């Protein structure tokens, strides 16, 4: 039963092979090897038939065997094997039939256009094997049976022993090699691939549909050679064309050729485009792609249909496909929308850098080994990445609106792309060492991006300043919160720190990218900051002018004087890079501080003016109430001034010192009161005591106008002098210290002393004139920087005896008309 089943299986195999052979014969009816193949098939059928007969004889009874053994002396010898008529040639393998992979002249090349020289074919090897089998007649029958079973198993895809052999072959140990040896082997392999021998072009090409199907199935070797054969056939027919019908047929064939070439080109570009994403699948295909491109480059100058690619030729189409593959890699990187993720750009660029490195590692380790060196594969991919990334960044830039995203984009371009994180990665060496690692950005793109970064920094600076004012109003002015003090017990606000921190952070971040960008960002921030002092002043006065607590109002003003003084100092650090902007800002800050100081002065002046106006009057002489109010308010101001920073505190105190002295002395110039009955002694004593208290107070406040101290003593000496004639002895020191005093000023002082008229007064005034002449021309006006009396107006006293007489009395004295 087993022998019958085996014979049936062999009969099925023969019918299967017969149908396969008939299909292949139909596919290539004009093949020059048809007769040889038919002969091989006939021999194979006869061999299978004899194997079946041998198998049938082997199934006879024991009697036949015993009889045969007795005839041969006990040895089992098959008579058919010893017969010369049964020494048949070995059957050809089914895998060598027409149309099979090994039967194809392309497939016989082992997947490459390279032809091994001096190597024997598979058919010769198999022939030798069968020749050795025929040398042992005793084993022919068993050999044929085994070969028949082997053919059956191979055709039915059983192949267990073959699979085991393959597995054992795959599990062979791999010998470790050094990096240098590996590079040498790769170099040798690449150098071998640079040259090639084009396999023999078939005399009769496949049909257009068959070639197109081979292209679609990515059987590029066979498809391309048949396409070349079709081109040769077309050239021959065109040369022999004479009739109009033939011309139409040629035009149709030319169109088919162009369609096939376009299909081949599209398939080549598709393989190259996907080679990075599918390197293992396309590795062998890329070898065929390279050979097709090389061959077409040789044929570009030849007339025909091959030159349908266009500008750049096949090599240009290959570069275009590489670029498209690179662009596809970049587009595959995940990208969130800005509204989905605040860090959308940073995340995307991080993933983009990793994708670039991984792809170039594949090119370096896998893809470039499938091309000849002339393709310069790694350099081409690097160049394509430079261009594709540049265009990708240009598209990303259109979505950027925030300052942090502009920073992220610039930082990635300038600091990350060329760094070891991406293009200078150690994993890409040594190939990358000879490459240009810079992006192929459009001219002006980077400057445009920096300009937008600066503009956005300016806009965010404006928004930050508005927010600072809003917080100050909410936290301080509306709540009437007392200002805080710093470690040195000065009034302090966080305004200057908030502003400085914002400018500093922008400067530091931009400096990491580019020094020129840092300058541009700082200048933009300072330009926006120039408007802030006036904006702050308007908001401050609007919110706090109606404040009922004058002391808190003064504290606020001192606080902001300190804050803007500190802001000015911070911004001075950028004078070297932005001198114009710093100068402008300094003027604006100085103007604001001056107005704040002036506001404090006006507040103090308005507060003490009523008390100063009542100096040098009868009430002043009899009570100290007004002076004590003046002194109390000045002391309170002194406490405020202790929390004001230098140098504004000295300016402020000195200005108030001058004001108090001037207003105090000015009351003598108003001629409101004249001391009589020796009251000038009491007035002089009181004036000296008050003056000493004011001097001590302003000394504690560290006034810089110490030149004002002597005026009180000089005037007290004149007013308190008992002998009128000795008054002129006190003029010398007065004129020396205050050369701007005039006869009108001295006359008013003498009036307060009680010396209204008379010869003594004229002598004193004449002495003043002589002293001023001795001082020279400059002494007439005095030192403008230290002028005191020049700013005092004198009210002319009415010393006429008839001034107070009624008009009725005066009319009686007038002559009759």
Image (cartoon, helix red, strand yellow):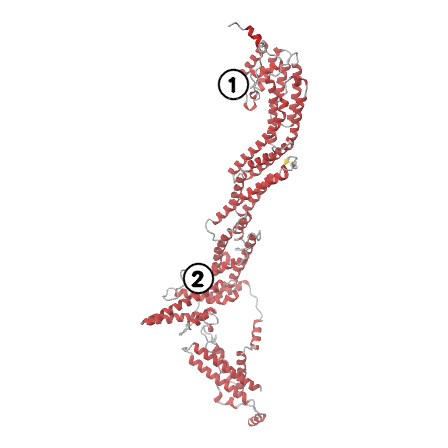
Distance from label 2 to label 1 (Cα)? Answer: 98 Å
Tell me, for residue 317, which label it has, or none: 2
User: Where does residue 344 sit, x and y in percent of width and height?
Assistant: 56, 53
Reading the chain from its start, which is encountered first: label 2 or label 1? 2
Q: Residue furthest top?
A: 816
The quarter in which the N terminus is drawn is bottom right
Nearer the observer: mark 2 or 1; the answer is 2
Circle 1 residue: 777
User: Where does residue 603 sit, x and y in percent of width and height?
Assistant: 61, 28
Task: Identify which residue, 188 or 152, lies in the foreground.
Answer: 152
Please tell me which residue is depicted at 53% across the width and 15% down the height of the picture. Answer: 773
Q: Quadrant of residue 347?
A: bottom right
Q: Quick one: SS at disc 2?
A: helix
User: Where does residue 765 sit, x and y in percent of width and height?
Assistant: 57, 13
Crowd class of label 1 (few under 14; some 14 to 19; many from 20; radius 10 Å): few
Number of numbered labels in the structure image? 2
Crowd class of label 2 (few under 14; some 14 to 19; many from 20; radius 10 Å): many
User: Where does residue 116 sit, x and y in percent of width and height?
Assistant: 46, 72
Q: Is residue 173 above or below residue 150?
A: above
């Amino acid at each position: 039963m087993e022998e019958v089943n085996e014979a049936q299986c062999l009969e099925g195999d023969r019918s299967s092979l017969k149908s396969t052979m008939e299909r292949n014969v139909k596919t290539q009816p004009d093949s020059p090897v048809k007769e040889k193949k038919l002969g091989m098939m006939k021999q194979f059928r006869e061999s299978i038939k004899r194997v079946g007969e041998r198998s049938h004889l082997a199934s006879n009874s024991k009697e036949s065997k015993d009889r045969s053994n007795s005839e041969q002396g006990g040895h089992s010898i098959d008579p058919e094997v010893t017969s010369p008529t049964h020494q048949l040639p070995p059957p050809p393998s089914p895998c060598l039939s027409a149309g099979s992979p090994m039967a194809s002249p392309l497939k016989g090349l082992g997947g490459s256009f390279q032809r091994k020289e001096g190597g024997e074919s598979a058919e010769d090897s198999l022939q030798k094997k069968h020749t050795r089998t025929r040398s042992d007649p005793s084993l022919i029958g068993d050999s044929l049976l085994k070969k028949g079973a082997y053919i059956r198993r191979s055709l039915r895809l059983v192949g267990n022993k073959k699979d085991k052999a393959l597995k054992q072959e795959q599990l062979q140990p791999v010998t470790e090699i050094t990096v240098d040896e590996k590079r040498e082997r790769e170099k040798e392999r690449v150098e071998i691939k640079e040259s090639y021998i084009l396999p023999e072009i078939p005399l009769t090409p496949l049909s257009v549909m068959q070639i197109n199907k081979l292209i679609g199935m990515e059987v590029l070797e066979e498809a391309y050679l048949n396409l070349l054969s079709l081109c040769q056939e077309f050239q021959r027919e065109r040369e022999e064309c004479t009739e109009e019908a033939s011309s139409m047929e040629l035009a149709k064939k030319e169109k088919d050729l162009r369609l096939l070439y376009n299909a081949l080109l599209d398939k080549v570009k598709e393989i190259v485009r996907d080679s990075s994403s599918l390197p293992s699948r396309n590795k062998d295909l890329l070898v065929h792609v390279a050979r097709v491109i090389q061959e077409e480059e040789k044929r570009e100058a030849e007339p025909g249909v091959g030159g349908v690619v266009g500008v750049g030729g096949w090599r240009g189409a290959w570069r275009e496909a590489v670029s498209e593959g690179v662009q596809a890699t970049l587009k595959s990187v995940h990208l969130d929308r800005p509204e989905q993720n605040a860090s959308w750009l940073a995340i995307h660029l991080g993933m983009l850098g990793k994708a670039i490195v991984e792809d170039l590692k594949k090119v370096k380790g896998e893809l470039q080994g499938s091309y000849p060196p002339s393709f310069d594969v790694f350099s081409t991919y690097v160049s394509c990445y430079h261009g594709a990334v540049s265009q990708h960044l240009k598209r990303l830039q259109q979505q950027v609106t925030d300052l942090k995203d502009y920073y992220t984009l610039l930082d990635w371009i300038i600091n990350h792309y060329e760094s070891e994180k991406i293009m200078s990665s150690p994993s890409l060496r040594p190939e990358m060492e000879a490459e240009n690692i810079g992006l192929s950005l459009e001219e002006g793109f980077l400057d445009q991006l920096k300009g937008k970064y600066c503009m956005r920094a300016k806009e965010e600076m404006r928004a930050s300043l508005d927010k600072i004012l809003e917080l100050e109003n909410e936290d301080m002015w509306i709540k009437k919160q007392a200002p805080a003090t710093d470690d040195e017990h000065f009034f302090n606000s966080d305004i200057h720190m908030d502003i400085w921190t914002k400018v500093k952070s922008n400067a530091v971040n931009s400096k990491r990218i580019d020094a020129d960008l840092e300058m541009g960002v700082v200048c933009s921030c300072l330009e926006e900051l120039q408007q802030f002092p006036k904006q702050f002043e308007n908001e401050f006065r609007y919110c706090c002018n109606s404040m009922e607590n004058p002391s808190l109002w003064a504290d606020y003003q001192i606080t902001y004087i300190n804050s803007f003084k500190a802001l000015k100092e911070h911004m001075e650090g950028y004078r070297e890079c932005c001198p114009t902007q710093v100068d402008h800002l300094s003027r604006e800050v100085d103007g604001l501080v001056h107005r704040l100081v002036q506001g404090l002065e006006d507040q103090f002046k308005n507060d003490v003016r009523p008390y100063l106006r009542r100096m040098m009057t009868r009430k002043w002489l009899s009570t100290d109430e007004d002076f004590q109010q003046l002194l109390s308010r000045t002391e309170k101001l002194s406490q405020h001034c202790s929390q004001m920073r230098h140098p504004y505190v000295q300016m402020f105190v000195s200005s108030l010192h001058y004001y108090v002295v001037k207003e105090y002395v000015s009351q003598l110039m108003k001629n409101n009161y004249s001391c009589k009955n020796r009251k000038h002694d009491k007035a002089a004593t009181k004036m000296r005591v008050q003056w000493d208290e004011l001097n001590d107070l302003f000394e504690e406040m560290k006034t810089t106008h110490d030149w004002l101290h002597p005026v009180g003593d000089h005037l007290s000496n004149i007013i308190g002098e008992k002998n009128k004639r000795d008054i002129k002895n006190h003029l010398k020191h007065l004129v020396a210290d205050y050369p701007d005093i005039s006869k009108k000023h001295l006359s008013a002082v003498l009036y307060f002393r009680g010396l209204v008229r008379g010869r003594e007064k004229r002598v004193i005034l004449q002495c003043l004139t002589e002293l001023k002449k001795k001082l020279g021309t400059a002494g007439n006006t005095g030192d403008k920087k230290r002028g005191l009396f020049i700013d005092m107006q004198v009210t002319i006293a009415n010393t006429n005896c008839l001034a107070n007489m009624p008009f009725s009395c005066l009319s009686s004295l007038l002559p009759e008309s």
